[in-house]
Image (tube, rainbow, N blue to C red):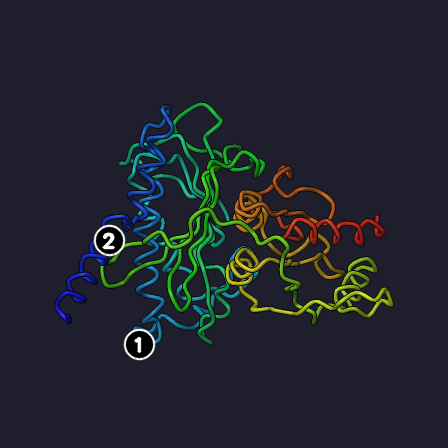
Amino acid sequence: MFWRWAGSQQSKSHEAMTNSSVVTLERHIVEEERNRPEATGAFSNILLSITLAAKIISREVNKAGIVDLLGGTGDTNVQGERVQKLDLYAQDVIYRAMDHTGALCCMVSEESEDILPIPEQFPKGKYVLIFDPLDGSSNIDVNVSIGTIFSVHRKITDGEDGTVEDCLQAGCKQVAAGYVLYGSSTMLVYTSGQGVHGFTLDPSIGEFLLSHRDLVIPDPPSRMYSINEAYYPRWSRGQQRLMQHLKGLDGEGTVSYSSRYIGSLVADFHRTLLKGGIFMYPADSKSPHGKLRLLYEAAPMAMICEQAGGRASDGGTRILDLIPEAIHQRTPLYIGSSEIVAMAEDFLAEDV
């Protein structure tokens, strides 16, 4: 009887394995390319190179403390922020993984004041890569989840070399956007305009495997908000009233929302994407134009959010409609479940 049962179990196990298949990120990219007759392979090459860089950064993040990659360099970047050792390491890894592919005409990084040109010895391509090499790097020393954010645009100017004009495009012109989360596991989430997909790195085989197909922000969403409430005294009247409403303190009898705040955009947005709710980084009296960068933080996350059925706004205007005027331009950000972001916009409208 045991052998008959064991044989039956083995048969069922084999059948399950036959009916399901492991989908790697590389396979997923190739299959998406097949669905686009106009594809040349250049865009796929970009994503695969980003994948390689993410694996290297993930490895170093996981052992940063024992290879002296923790802590600051003593310098500040163009944002006026302390540069962490891993910031520079991550930028160098991404740049070197991408500079020779022949797919890019230039790159833009949070850590560099000007655009990053492609070295003369390498061929130029028709795409621009915009990236934040290590978002949330101020949390590195305390082992909080951090991430890499990236955005891809098509070149719009003539000539081989990329220009500032190629970089200063509205978010709605993005070809793709994504992020890599370095946490309890390493996860890559991206969209190329056909839904949002998440891949988790299996370190035993060194591959990103499809773990979250067709991600959609839950509806109805969870009643959660994410914001740094220490800045409350510096917020506008509309923002303060919004917070009172979310806490159920405005006398309207609403059920209060729960607060969840990590302090790392990638980690806070990732939770919002999976659970619903809203992430907010509003303007305030000290930062009247907001704090997050439009090109390589807000716009990529906005594309992902909208592809997942959510909404992203600066408090009054759709993030993807904003036309950047400078590489390091900042913006307020309200992102997450559509109905909650719309509610936030209603409260903020009283400030206009």
Identify the residue under disc 2.
Answer: 17
Identify the residue under disc 1.
Answer: 66
Above or below for 74 versus 309? below
Q: Residue 176 in the image: x percent, y percent?
A: 46, 40
Q: Secondary structure at mark 1?
A: helix
Q: Residue at x 22, y 58 (%)?
A: 13
Closest to the observer: 263 or 141? 263
> Left or right of 235: which side holds 17?
left
Q: Residue at x 21, y 63 (%)?
A: 9
**C-beta proximity under 8 Å, tags 2 and 1:** no
Q: Residue at x 63, y 64 (%)?
A: 226
Q: Amino acid at mark 2?
A: Met
Q: Residue furthest left?
A: 3
Q: Residue 136 in the image: x percent, y percent?
A: 50, 63
Q: Residue 252 in the image: x percent, y percent?
A: 85, 64
> Left or right of 352: which side holds 336?
left
Q: Residue at x 63, y 52 (%)?
A: 337
Which numbered disc, 2 or 1, marks the residue that appears first in the sequence? 2
Front label number (2 vs 1): 2
Name which quarter of the figure residue 37 lies in. Answer: top left
Q: Amino acid at mark 1?
A: Ile
- Residue 139 seen anywhere in this rendered image of the structure: yes
